[in-house]
Amino acid sequence: MALTLNQQVENKIPIEANGILPELLWGKTMDQIKSLLVPCGNEMVELGELFSVSGSIDQDKTVIFDGSLSNVNGIGMGMAWGFIQICGNAGNRIGVAMSGGEIRSTADVGAHLGSEMTGGVIVVKGDAGDSVGSVLPGSKVGVNRGAILVRGSVGKGAGESMRRGLLVVGGNAGDLLGWSMRAGSLVVFGMAGADVGAEMKRGTIVLGGGFAPSLSSSFRSGGSFRMPAISLIANWLKRSHPDFDVDVSRLDTNFDLFHGDFLHGGRGEILIPAN
């Protein structure tokens, strides 16, 4: 049995859920869990006053957030182990700086999904907002290991300053995809907006649906190839996440390779399916 937190009526006041983690709730009694203080607006409120709490943290180490959650931010922030299931639209900063475990969302989430994570897996069945898998304001390094899978579309700035790891988007991506990317892999099955890979130093961006405007002149064609590394990503998706409903066979093709950004060293790669 998992521990379930249900917010049946949406609270307009933002709730910060970054302290509601499997590793922090493990071993606590129901009374202790309900009495945990949670930031709600400019006050600290007991968890039991904000959510209907049922179940327990048992061997599966699972916490379920259910109900109207668009005002709930920071779910899974700093998570090290365990499993979090989100049933309903959720707020911003889901899985920020997590180092392990798994987060799954059945609906949409807000901005900064998985920013600065160093491990673990996040799977979102809906859409995500801006700055998915990116860097937080004032920081320099974004995602540095781990995997983020978004079945829908993402906003602008996804993968900004990414260092390592994998970001897969089943739908479209907004402008500035992979901006200032340092390493890692971004795979977008739909279309991407303007300034793809701007200021990227290393890393690989795969654009399954191409990009809306023309590619920056600071990228140069490197020929057409079949890329074994992309096949490895496709095989991993099929094997580890068969419920991530995308046609991975679209990655089994030749790609046009573009090197760049030559204003910043030119060691990054953008791959587009060859015609």
Image (tube, rainbow, N blue to C red):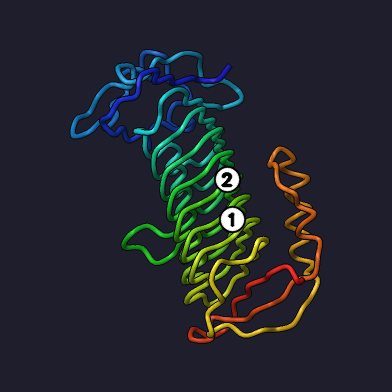
Q: Which residue is mark 1?
A: 167
- Of residue 153 and residue 112, the one placed in the foreground of this image is 153
- Of residue 210 and residue 78, the one placed in the foreground of this image is 210
Residue drawn at x 76%, y 57% is 250
Q: Position of residue 126 (x, y in %)?
A: 55, 39
Residue 63 shown left or right of residue 137 in the figure:
right
Q: Residue furthest left?
A: 42
Q: Quadrant of residue 6?
A: top left
Residue drawn at x 54%, y 30% is 85
Q: Which residue is mark 2?
A: 152
Secondary structure of the residue carrying numbered label 1: strand
Identify which amino acid the numbered label 1 is placed on: Leu
Q: Position of residue 104 (x, y in %)?
A: 57, 36
Could you tell which of marks 1 and 2 lies nearer the N-terminus? 2
Crowding around mark 1 (Cα neighbors within 10 Å: few <14, some 14 to 19, many 20+) is many
Label ID, residue 134: none
Crowding around mark 2 (Cα neighbors within 10 Å: few <14, some 14 to 19, many 20+) is many
Identify which amino acid the numbered label 2 is placed on: Gly
